[in-house]
């Protein structure tokens, strides 16, 4: 290669680099360095594995959130879909051995059902996703209050749920981390190697153009919301396994972090742009940020303010980029 060709190659590689992802991973390194100033354990393998284990629950939920955001939609039903997954899976364990065997798939199926309601409302009834998902969230909350009579759920998680969320059967790696890796690999394959994934990006960029090109946009949106609901419920199943029982409101603290993780990783909240590697970086970044805020004893209100500011800033940034394009 000629010397004159080297600068062109360097420029080409620079253009291919997903800068938001690089920035997110850079922030992760910075947070670890800042955390190490408080305690040397921030850089220990044990601490890092523990943080990845905690990040796995958010990572599973954020995977579904990302798919919906790539469509240019938003899912505000995450909090109580997570709770439904956890509470219904633990309720199934009270049905005896058969219930314990079906606990995990039953919890996920309940989330898929709620996701289908979301998707049907958005795709076929043409309701704004913000409105229909908020309504489904309220309905799910009401159903769970009726189910428990307003009291804390008394059912415990099944042994399989606890093993999945807290065990470490392979080389000392947390099972939850392996689960997230499997979910992530599936999402990468789905988005990058299938016609469904290409359709999701196409709808996010311009739904009408995708429809005119022959894509069944309604079916794609319906499936995407169903997947998101199933993954949110699966996150609830894992959280119930981690805590050994479910709780009302167990998903309330995951809505803003899930959205923030996706947009921090470079996905446009307006749809059509984003990579799963960015979501991974965003999930780890949010988890480390939560850990540091806990160390400095930041109140929950302050954490929510930080997440909200991040989302607003990214919305303004990507909104300007979209208009420029």
Image (cartoon, rainbow, N blue to C red):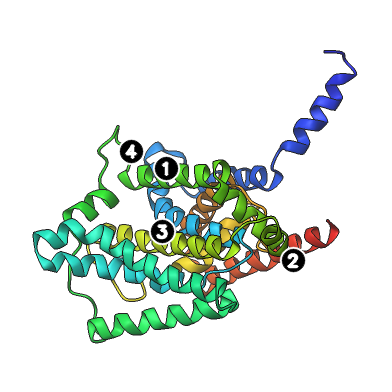
Tell me the SS state at disc 3. Answer: helix
Q: Decide which of tag 4 and tag 2 comes sooner along the chain.
A: 4
Residue named by callout 2: 316
| Residue occupying the point 73% across, 37% down | 16
Nearer the observer: mark 3 or 1; the answer is 3
Pick out the residue farthest to the right: 4
Q: Is residue 172 above or below residue 295?
A: above
Q: Decide which of tag 3 and tag 2 comes sooner along the chain.
A: 3
Q: Decide which of tag 3 and tag 4 comes sooner along the chain.
A: 4
Nearer the observer: mark 1 or 2; the answer is 1
Nearer the observer: mark 1 or 4; the answer is 1
Pointer 1 local density, CA inside 10 Å: few below 14, some 14–19, many at least 20: some
| Residue occupying the point 54% across, 71% down | 304
Q: Position of residue 101 (x, y in %)?
A: 17, 56
Residue named by callout 3: 231
182 to the left or right of 125: left
Pointer 3 local density, CA inside 10 Å: few below 14, some 14–19, many at least 20: many
The image quadrant of residue 272 is bottom right
Residue named by callout 4: 173
């Amino acid at each position: 290669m000629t010397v004159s060709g080297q600068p062109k190659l360097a420029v080409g590689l620079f253009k291919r680099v997903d800068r938001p992802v690089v920035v997110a991973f850079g922030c992760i390194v910075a947070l670890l360095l800042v955390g190490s100033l408080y305690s040397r354990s921030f850089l220990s393998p044990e601490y890092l594995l523990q943080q990845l284990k905690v990040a796995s629950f958010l990572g599973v939920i954020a995977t579904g959130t990302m798919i919906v955001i790539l469509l240019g939609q938003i899912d505000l039903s995450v909090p109580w879909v997570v709770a439904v997954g956890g509470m219904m899976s633990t309720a199934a364990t009270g049905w005896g051995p058969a219930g314990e065997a079906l606990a995990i798939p039953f919890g996920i199926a309940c989330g898929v059902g709620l996701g289908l309601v979301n998707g049907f409302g958005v795709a076929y009834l043409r309701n704004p996703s913000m409105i229909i998902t908020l309504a489904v969230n309220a309905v799910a909350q009401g159903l769970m209050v009726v189910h428990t009579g307003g009291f804390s759920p008394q059912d415990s998680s099944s042994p399989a749920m606890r093993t999945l969320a807290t065990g470490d059967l392979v080389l000392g790696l947390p099972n939850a981390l392996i689960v997230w890796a499997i979910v992530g690999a599936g999402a990468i394959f789905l988005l990058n190697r299938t016609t469904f994934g290409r359709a999701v990006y196409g709808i996010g960029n311009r739904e009408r153009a995708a429809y005119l090109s022959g894509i069944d946009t309604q079916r794609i949106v319906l499936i995407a919301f169903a997947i998101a609901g199933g993954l949110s419920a699966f996150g609830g199943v894992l959280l119930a396994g981690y805590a050994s029982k479910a709780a009302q409101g167990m998903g309330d603290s995951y809505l803003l972090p899930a959205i923030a993780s996706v947009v921090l990783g470079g996905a446009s909240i307006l749809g059509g742009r984003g990579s799963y590697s960015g979501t991974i970086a965003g999930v780890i970044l949010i988890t480390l940020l939560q850990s540091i805020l806990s160390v400095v004893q930041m109140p929950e209100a302050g954490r929510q303010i930080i997440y909200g500011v991040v989302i607003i800033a990214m919305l303004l940034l990507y909104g300007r980029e979209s208009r420029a394009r």
